[in-house]
Amino acid sequence: MPEVVRGPPQHGYQPHRQDRVAAETAPPAMTTDRRSSRLEPSPIELIDRSKKVEFEFNGRLIHAYAGDTIGSALYASGVRIFSRSFKYHRVRGMLCVSGNCPNCLMTVDGVPNVRACIRRVEQGMKVKGQNAWPGLERDLFSIIDRFRWALPIGFYYKGLYRPRALWDFSASLIRRLAGLGSVNLDAEEHRAEHRSYAHADVAVVGGGVAGMSAALEAASNGARVTLVDDQPTLGGKFWYGSRHEIVNINDREFAAPEAGQALAVRVTEHDRIDVLSDSTVFGHYEGNLLGVRTPHGIVHLRGRHVIVATGAQEVPLTFERNDLSGVMLSTGIRRLINLYGVKPGNSALVVTTNDEAYYSALDMLEAGMRIVALADTRPEFRRDLDAATTLKSMGVLILPNYAMVRAEGTRTVIGGIVGEIGPNGTTGNERQFDCDTIAMSGGFQPSSALLHQAGATFMRDFDVDADIPVDLPEYVHAAGDVTAIHDPNVSALQGRLAGIEASSAIRPSANDTERSTIKQSLRESISSYRRRVLITPAPVDLAAGPRQFVCYCEDVLAKDVVQGVDEGFRDVQMLKRYSTVTMGPCQGKMCHKRFAEILSQETDTPLTEVGSTTSRPPVQPLTLGELAGPMHMAFKRTPIHQRHLQANAKMAESGGWHRPHSYGDPQEEAKAVRQSVGIIDVGTLGKLDVQGKDAPELLDFVYTHRFSDLRPGRVRYSVLTGDNGTIMDDGTVARLADDHYYVTTSTANVETVEQWFQWWMADREMRAYVTNVTSGYSVINIAGPNARATLSKLTDIDLSPSKFRYMRVKRGDVAGVPAILLKIGFVGESGWEVHCPAEYGEHMWDALLSAGEEFDIRPFGVEAQRILRLEKMHIIPSQDTDLLTTPFDVGADWVVKFDKGDFVGAGGLRLARDQEDRDKLVGFVMSDGVVPHDGDSVVDEENWPIGRITSSRLSPTMGKGFGYARVPAHLADEGETIRIWTEGSAHDATVTLRPFYDPEGKRLRE
């Protein structure tokens, strides 16, 4: 029998009592412990104690600090019951503190199944428990636990399928009683529609020592690197390590937190590394495409090479009542202590199969907890482990060759029993300890889901008690704990080697000597690790009790797995589906290792042949809103888009484009154009280049105006109509040569107009070429009294009124760039549209702003443009028109030329011309200070709708509300009074048929 190692008595421990009363007869434990409180501040903690946050949990006000998670704040406030289990409604508390288990699932602000242990607190958030009635403290459905003997796996398949009515009733009842959170169907719709696309030479997944070493090596070799980490701070497991843990990296010794921090500083300061923190890679897809969920939306990241350094997650032990509140993973306890400054309890029983729990025990001692004993399944005391000798010197009772038998308590832990491991894996010589916390470590399971999805093959390595990757796909690399080697120096070397190999394939400049040196050091370090590592698989003693949970997500017990095997489900995939193990929220992160071990034991099948369940995306759960796309609408951006963002423009969607709505106050922007000079990016305009022998005939046929007689160098406005004569679009046509026209269309309709042209060309066999050049040109409109003085600084073209008249076009250089200049006035001021190659768009924008500095030039957005064009009574198709509007209805009779021969819409227009009772588009000015809204109704004396407002704004020139209204013909006279219903009442307005600003058009021609 192994020696029981006992240290000096300075620390002390709770001696076992042979005649102790059974824990189940003890009084129920309180679910809040006011003695558990915050620890003294730590330099590595994530919370900001200067910023307090309050939120509500089940109606109770909880105090927290900025940086707290919901789970850490609740634990610090004494809450111990976090959820109720899926099937039996058993009490569940914190377990992993890393988002890998189901114990902390809660409903937050109406969103179900939020992982409270990793969701940071926000002021005023409302948090509720779920899957319990009437509440977590007293859940009436917990009575199901008493009848678990009648609810084995697959019970519904065996006893509820006949008669059919019983199945329908039972299925509905089971779904109500079991499950997780409930979706609020009345909640406000939220769609996480933000999408971005990124490319990297090397994409690194994981921000631990291996991931950071790989990123630094690849970036130093010239590669562009993107590093993705699911934690708010880089550092991996060293992020929550303690000063007691000394690690060796590249032949240098560091305390664990210092090692992570030193590498993190280098990574964040490297100009070739982009870091996505708080971001989860949820899937690896064909072609090294990674799906990444970030706080700002989904990123599609494609890397030429992908380095997977996702580490490993600690897994629980299987023993009787291993799901009680107070049973926690040792790494979860370290996170609570070191990251959030929370004392997990007062006394702890530590049970482990590896070295990790020894460091957790040191952290617990430093936090003021008492270690009643440390039970280690390995047969001998770890004399070569500094943490073990330190604990021994502090008086901690260390029990080699002991395993956990059962936890004591009904709702929360009040004690634990360990037993000596016998030859056949059973336990005896039991010892009992009083405690309120059980810290367990059942070993580590590599977080290899992404490698599985990439197509890697694995082999069981009994030295490290894990499956290790042995054959990786091309362009995919693995480094760190995901290879099941838990040594910081090995992780750093693996990361460096992966970084060199990935970047060398892209930029062959790595030093072969350095690579050989790293490989040699890596072989020696791995060999050293294998010589000293000792991991003993924890025994599963089925005789210890019936409540040994293998899968916390689905409430699957060890006896359930055994029963499934006895019923013939001996294949890992079949048994998974029958028992539902690994099918819950954790997707096997907590249960697959123990599940495979029990299956191997019960079927006498070597673990090498048991295999594993299939890993599929997503690795972590996603909401449907995150997966939903933006209605498949791809937004377009102009070549000057970045300049608008730099100017803090408020962006808006318009016709499928992202455009500046405003740069500040739209009223002030409009005044700047009227009083001095302004510029606007109108690169969104559709632009068609029309050339060929029949180009004049084509334009005459599709437009209402005549263009065959338009002289080169001139511009003409017209509209496009459908077969019935209603307006499809409008725009300008500039003639550059006898057989060459330059056509502009409205923002949203260029593709439609292009197809319209092509349709009629084919029908009439015209010889012309129509080319969509919208993306090839950047267009800037400069307008205002000082527009000429500004533009003259940048060009040799004579811009004087006599040489460059209104509705003319010229070619020449502007700011050293070849450009097409159109003198037109959509905003009602003298101005020019400058059309230049798209690649010079930013240059032209900067040059115009610089040239106009002495005139206080200002950029203006779409909103100011709409105000200005409305004052000039220029229409916008689809806003001021509808599917029944003709040119005659908007006062554009002059653009219809019936004397030019047949054209599209001629028949419909002739009918419309003779209909005197058609509704008309008219201008209006409000009689009071009210400004109507677009879409408000024009009403009669009895307040019945008879028309509608198509456009309405506040005029900076008149200081009144004004706009366009569609009204019956009898109200479409100058000076007529109409009534507009807005804000719940009718208001008078006066009709006008003349432009509100510069009705004679003198400013346009200056």
Image (cartoon, rainbow, N blue to C red):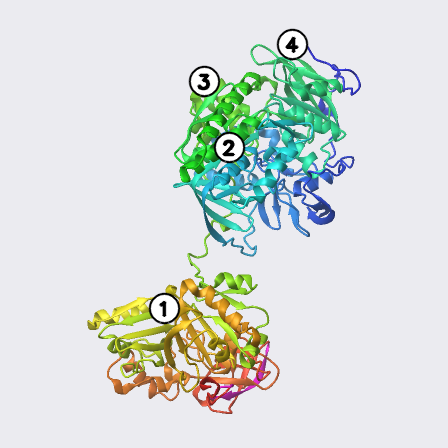
Asked whether residue 160 appears in the rendered view, the answer is no
Mark 1 lies on a secondary structure that is helix
Tell me whether the residue at label 1 lies in contact with that at label 2, contact meaning CB atoms closer than 8 angstroms. Answer: no
Asked whether residue 690 appears in the rendered view, the answer is yes
Nearer the observer, 531 or 520 = 520
Residue 388 screen position, x and y as percent = 68, 19
Q: Which mark is residue 606?
A: 3
Nearer the observer, 897 or 202 = 202
Marks 4, 3: nearer the viewer: 4
Q: Earlier in the sequence, mark 4 or mark 2?
A: 4
> Residue beneath label 1, please?
750
Q: Is residue 177 above or below residue 154?
A: below
Inspect the image, locate mark 4, and give the three-letter code of the amino acid beneath it. Answer: Pro
Residue 717 screen position, x and y as percent = 37, 80
Q: Earlier in the sequence, mark 3 or mark 1?
A: 3
Quarter of the N terminus within the rendering: top right
Identity of the residue drawn at 54% across and 51% down? 296
Q: Earlier in the sequence, mark 1 or mark 4?
A: 4
Mark 3 surroundings: few (<14), some (14-19) or many (≥20) residues within 10 A = some
Residue 546 screen position, x and y as percent = 59, 23
> Residue beneath label 4, please?
2
Give the residues drawn in magenta, as a range. Answer: 984-997
> Residue beneath label 2, please?
496
Q: Is residue 198 left or right of residue 942?
A: left
Nearer the observer, 442 or 822 = 822
Q: Earlier in the sequence, mark 3 or mark 2?
A: 2
Mark 4–mark 3 distance (CA, rounded to whole Å): 28 Å
Residue 132 among magenta residues: no
